[in-house]
Amino acid sequence: QEITPYGSEDNKKFTIELLNGFLTQLELTEQERKVMDMYFDEELQLKEIAKILGVTESRCCQIKNAVINKLRKLFEKEGYNTNHKNLG
C-alpha cells in the first residue's frame, strides 16, 4: 500500500484516522502530541505552535520531524510505503 496526498475529503478523514491510530502506538510525550495535534489537526504553522508552547520555531520543527521519523518506521513495519515526497 502507498500513502498519498489526500485527494478527497474521504481520503483526508481516512488518513487522519490512520495517523491518529499510529500516533497512539508511539507513546508520545505531551509536547510531541501537542505539536502534532496543532500542526495536523488544527493546521497551525510551526511559528504559531512555537508561540503557544513557548519554544522556538526550530524546536517545533525538530519535534515534528522526530515524530514523523518514528511514524515512518512504524508505517514501514506495518507494510506501508512511506517513500512519498509529501510525507514530512
Image: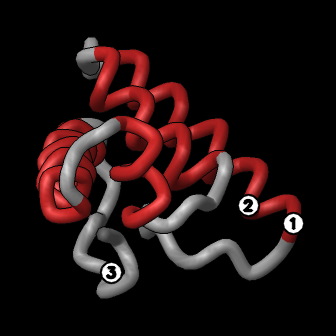
Note whether 13 is above or below 7 in the view shown.
Answer: above
Residue indicated by mark 1: 9
| Position in image of residue 38 (x %, y %) | 54, 45
- Dot 2 falls on a residue whose secondary structure is helix
> Foreground: 32 or 49?
49
| Position in image of residue 40 (x %, y %) | 55, 53
Query: What colouring does the structure picture have?
Result: secondary structure
- Contact check, label 2 and label 3, Cβ < 8 Å: no
- Contact check, label 1 and label 3, Cβ < 8 Å: no
Disc 1 residue type? Glu
Q: Quadrant of the C terminus?
A: bottom left
| Position in image of residue 27 (x %, y %) | 27, 13
- Dot 1 falls on a residue whose secondary structure is helix
- Contact check, label 2 and label 1, Cβ < 8 Å: yes
Q: Quadrant of the N terminus?
A: bottom left
State the CA–CA distance, disc 2 to disc 3.
Answer: 16 Å
Decide which of tag 2 and tag 3 comes sooner along the chain: 2
Q: Residues within 10 Å of mark 2 (few under 14, many from 20)?
A: few
Residue indicated by mark 2: 12
Residue 72 visible at all: no
Q: Residues within 10 Å of mark 3 (few under 14, many from 20)?
A: few
- Residue drawn at the location 30% of the way across and 86% of the way down: 85
- Residue drawn at the location 50% of the way across and 54% of the way down: 39
